[in-house]
Image: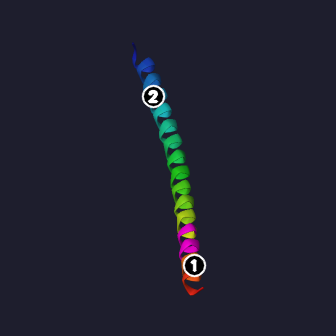
Amino acid sequence: MNIDEFENQYRDAIAETLNELQSAMLMLTQVQLKISQIGNSVQNLSQNFEEFIARQKNE
């Protein structure tokens, strides 16, 4: 292997690794968004449940 071949392999490997890192970051962002959405759903369910219980106690 000469220096040009080594340089090309190095550049290709770096480019592939950076693409994988970018993909992982995009997936992480999607996971964070989904966790936030689930958290909001749980919070809304909890609030609805508490309001329902309060109404039942008042009747």
Q: Residue furthest top?
A: 1
Q: Residue beneath label 2, please? A: 13
The one of 31 and 48 positioned closer to us in this rendering: 48
Q: Is residue 55 above or below residue 18?
A: below
Residue 30: % across, % down: 56, 50
Q: Position of residue 42 (x, y in %)?
A: 53, 64
| Left or right relative to 3: residue 44 | right
Q: Amino acid at mark 2?
A: Ala
Q: Is residue 30 left or right of residue 1?
A: right
For the point 47% across and 23% down, the residue is: 8
Bounds of the magenta segment: 45-50
Residue pointed to by mark 1: 51
Assign the N terminus to one quadrant of the image. top left
Say which label, 1 or 2, has the lower sequence index.
2
Instruction: Residue 18: give x, y in percent of width and height.
Output: 48, 38
What percent of the width, then of the height, locates residue 13? 45, 28
* Marks 1 and 2 in Cβ contact (< 8 Å): no
**Three-letter residue code for mark 1:** Glu
The quadrant the C terminus occupies is: bottom right
Can residue 48 be found in the magenta stretch? yes
- Give the main secondary structure, helix, strand or loop, of the magenta stretch: helix
Q: Residue at x 49, y 36 (%)?
A: 20
Q: Is residue 29 covered in magenta?
A: no
In 3D space, how far apart are the residues under numbered discs 1 and 2 (Cα atoms)? 57 Å
Q: Secondary structure at mark 1?
A: helix
Q: Disc count in the image?
A: 2
At 58% from the left edge and 80% from the top edge, which residue is drawn? 56
